Amino acid sequence: MVINLDPANEVPKTKTSAEGGTEPVENENDLPYEVLLDVCECVVNLSSVMKQLGLGPNGGLVYCMEYLEAHVDKIVAMIEERIRNEDEDVYLIFDLPGQVELYTHGNAVPRLLSKLVKILDLRLVAVQLIDSHYCTEPSNFLSAALLGTTVMLKLELPTVNVLSKVDLLASYGPLPFSLEFFTDCQDLNRLVPFLHQGYDDTTTNNDDAKYSSVSSTELYDEDNYADDPEYQLARKVKLSSPFFRRHERLHKAMAEVVDEFGLIAFLPLDISNAESVGRILSRIDKCNGYIFKQHSAHSTHENINASNVFQAAANQADPSNREIIADVQERVSLERDEKHNEKKEFG
C-alpha cells in the first residue's frame, strides 16, 4: 500500500483544452498509483502553501514537510484507521519528495520518519535512486555519491542505493571505467584525473580506454585539436590555474570522504527487465526483514528458530553482482558500437 508523503505530488485539477482554455480533469483525486493515504488531499499540499504564504517551490516544500512533522499524530491516526480492516501485517510504501536538500540540510524529514517508526513500529528501509547518466560525468558522480552518503548518515536507516536507467546508458555516452567501478563505489579518487577530460572510446576494453581533451559532443571526432598549438597552450594555462587546482583538491576531498565512510554502493536497475526489478525488490525485502516474515508464514511457531531465519536469508541471496553487471556492461558496449558504426556510415 502506497502512502503519498510528497506535498508536491499533486494531481492537476484542470487541463488545457484543444481551444486553449482550461477544463476540469476527470478523476481529479487519482494519482498514477493506488494510495492508502494522500497528504495532498488530507493534510497539506505545495500549491496551497505557495499561494497562501507567498513562498517559492523550495521554501514551500520545506514548510510542508515541517507541517507534516508537526501533525504526525494526525497522519498516524489516518493510517491506522485505513489499515484497520486490512491484514495484521501490511506492507507500506512511502512516496517522499525527491529534493535532496530536504535530507542533507533539513531535519524535518528525518524526524518525521523517526516518529513514524516509533509510533507505528515500522521496519523502514530507504531507497535512493540515482540516474546512471551521472556515471558519464566524473564530477557529477562524485557529487551524487557524497550526497547519497550524507542522506544515509542523516536518515540512519538501512538503505538500498539504485543506479537507475541503465537501459539508457548507451545513449548517454561512454564511461571512464566499467559499470562495476560505479556500482562498487571504491577508490573514487581514480575519477579525479578525468574531471576535465573527454573520453575517446576507441576500444571496447575499458581498462585500455584512451582519454583526450575533447568535450562530450566530440567523442567520435577524429580531429580533436591535438596538434593545435593555440589549443594546447590554452589547455596548459587552464590546468595550471588556481581555480583548476582548487577544483581538483575539492573533488579529491569528496572522493576521500565517500571512501572513508564506505557506506554507499549501487544496484543497477533496468526497468524493462523483470529480473532486474525483482533483484531490487528482493534486496529491499531483505533489508526490512520482510523475507523472514514470508519464510515464517510457511512454518509453524514451534519450528521457527535462528537457523530458519538464516536459511531464509540464504535462500534469498542475490546472484553474483559481478555476473549481472558484466552482462549489462556487455549490452551497453554492443549498443554503443552500433551507434558508433551508424555515425561513421552517415558521417
Image (tube, rainbow, N blue to C red):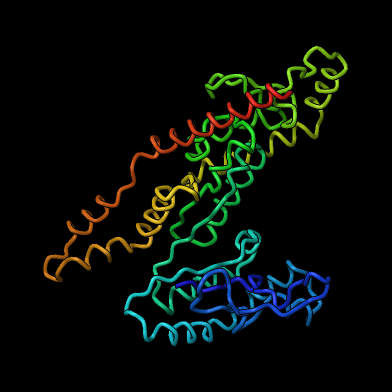
Up/down of 269 relative to 288, above or below = above
Q: Is residue 265 visible?
A: no
Q: Position of residue 85 (x, y in %)?
A: 37, 86
Q: Which residue is pictured at 64% across the width and 74% down the height?
A: 7
Q: Position of residue 95 (x, y in %)?
A: 54, 68
Up/down of 295 relative to 199, above or below = below
Up/down of 120 relative to 129, above or below = below
Using the image as rendered, state which of residue 79 and residue 147 is in the foreground: 79
Quadrant in which the N terminus appears:
bottom left
Q: Residue furthest front?
A: 19
Using the image as rendered, state which of residue 35 and residue 94 is in the foreground: 35
Q: Which residue is pictured at 80% across the width and 12% down the height?
A: 227
Q: Residue 61 vs residue 80: left or right?
A: right
Q: Which residue is pictured at 21% across the width and 53% down the height?
A: 311
Q: Which residue is pictured at 57% across the width and 50% down the height?
A: 130
Q: Position of residue 135 (x, y in %)?
A: 60, 39
Q: Residue furthest right?
A: 230
